[in-house]
Image (cartoon, grey):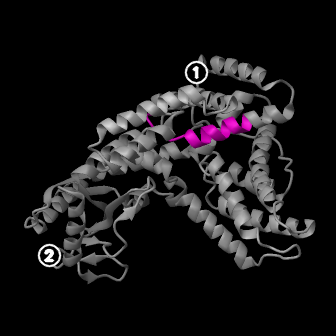
Amino acid sequence: MKLQVFEFIDETIEQLKGKKEELWWIANHLEKFFEEVLQEEDSYLNISSRVKSEDSLKEKILRQNFFLRYKRPDVVLERMVDLLGVRIECRFIRDEARIYERLVELFRTRLDDGFYRSELNDSIQLRIRESQPQKQHNGFEIYKLDGRYRTETTLYHFELQIKSFVNIFWGDIDHRILYKNFTYLATEDFIREVMYSIKDNLEMVDSQLMVVYNHLYNTEKNGTQSTKDQLKKLISKQIHDIFLLRFKATTGIVLDFRKPTDLIVDYIFAKAHYAREIEDSEYIIKLLNRLMEISRKELVFGDYIDLNGDRNWTGEYCALFGGGVESIMNLDLKWNLILSIIFELEGGDKSAEFVNFIEYIVFTIIYRVRTAVKQTKLTVDNGDQVTNGFTAEIFEYICYEYNADFFTLNNMRTIERLVLEFTEDMEPEELLSESDYKRFRKRLIKEVEG
C-alpha cells in the first residue's frame, strides 16, 4: 500500500501539465511587461521567465509538506509563491537597488492586502513595500519580491528577482552545489566556507585556491575530528548512499535527508552505548556488516507502516510526541523513511523500536533543558518547575508541525543555550512567568527557523 503523498504529487503534476500552456503565456506576458517598463534603464540587461518544472514541484511539495498543509492539488498551485518566476538581470550589484527603486515608483496603487499595482497593467501586482533586499538562509541578500497575476478566473503567484551578473553567477553555484546537492558530504561545512569566500571576492581565485589547499593540509595533518565523529559520518554516508540514492533512482525524487540521517545515526549509537552489550568498535563492525547485507537487498520505499499492539510510553511528552508522529508517519514522507530505515537496520519488534526511538528524542530534549537549569542557583523544586515550563513550550512548538529536520545537534545546543540565558541570573527561590516561557519559545523559533 503506497503513501497518499505520492498520489497527491501525481495529481498535482497532472494539474500542472494541464495549466502549462496558460502558465507559459503568463510568464511571457510578465517578461514583456517588465522589458517595456525598464527599457529606459541603462543598468537593465535582460529579463527571463520560467514555469516551475515537474521535478521542482515534487521536491517543493515534499520539502514544504504541502500534502499536509493544503490537502488539495489545486490549492497547492494557487498558493505556491514561485509557481512562475521572473528574473531581471543587470550589470552590477549597485544596479539592483536602482531597478528596485524604479519598480517602487511604478507600483504606487496600494491594494487592500498589501500588494501594489501600476497604472500600466491591473493584472500584475507586487508586494513591493517589504524590506529589501531580503536575507536568505545562506546569509546573503537578494532582491526578491512576491508577485501575482490575475486572470479572469484565477490568481497565479510569481517570484520576481533582481540580480547582477555576480549574483547570478553566485546564485547558480549556490543553488546547484549547496541548495540542490542533497548527497551527504562529510566536508560540507568546508565547501560552504570556500563558496562564501568566493562570493565575497570573486576575482581573488588564487587566494581561494590557497584557502582550499591550507584547509585540506591542516585537516589531514591535525585530525581535527574525533574518531567517533568520523565513524558517525562514515555510517551516515553509508546509510544515505544505500537508502536515499536508491530512493532517488526508484522514485525520481531528490530528497534532502542529511539531517534525518544524522538523527538515525545518533539514535543507533546512543542505543548501542546505553545497552552496553558490546564495545563501540565491535558495534561499528556489526553495523557495517548489516549495511552491506541491506545494500544487496531489493528495497521498497513508501510502504505503509503498521505498528501492532499498544505503546507503553514513559511520560506524557513521549505519549504526546509519539502519538503525533504515529498519526503522520504514513503521511509525512521523511518520518516514513526515518522509521523504515530504523526498522530495517535494527530489526526486531517495530512497536518496541518505535517507542525506544521516540523516547530517545524526548529524553534528549529534556536532558538539554535540565543540563542548563542545573547550572543555575535554583532550588531543586524550583528547578524542576522551570524545567517543566521550558519543556512544555518546546514540545508545543515541535508538536505543531513535527518537522523531522528539527532534531539536530545544533538545535539541541540552541535549546540549552537559550534556557541558560533565561535562567542564569535567577535567585534560588525565583520562578518564571508564563510570558517568560512564551518569550523563550519565540526566541527558539526565531533561531531555529532563521
Q: Position of residue 399 (x, y in %)?
A: 68, 59
How dense is the environment of label 2, judged by Cα within 10 Å: few (below 14), some, or many (20 and up)?
A: few
Query: Does 324 sit left or right of 211 as displayed?
Result: right
Q: Residue at x 61, y 58 (%)?
A: 401
Q: Amino acid at mark 2?
A: Leu
Q: Position of residue 87 (x, y in %)?
A: 24, 56
Q: Is residue 263 above or below residue 115?
A: above
Which residue bears the numbered disc 1? 298
The circle on residue 19 is none
Magenta-tinted stretch: 252-268
Query: Does 414 sit left or right of 208 as displayed?
Result: right
Q: Residue at x 69, y 34 (%)?
A: 342
Tell me the quarter of the image containing the N terminus.
top right
Q: Amino acid at mark 1?
A: Glu
- Residue 255 in sight from this viewpoint: no
Which residue bears the numbered disc 2? 120
Q: Residue at x 72, y 69 (%)?
A: 422
Query: Does 148 sit left or right of 40 as displayed?
Result: right
Q: Of callouts 1 and 2, which one flags the residue occurring earlier in the amino acid sequence?
A: 2
Residue 139: quarter of image: bottom left
Kind of element beneath mark 2: loop
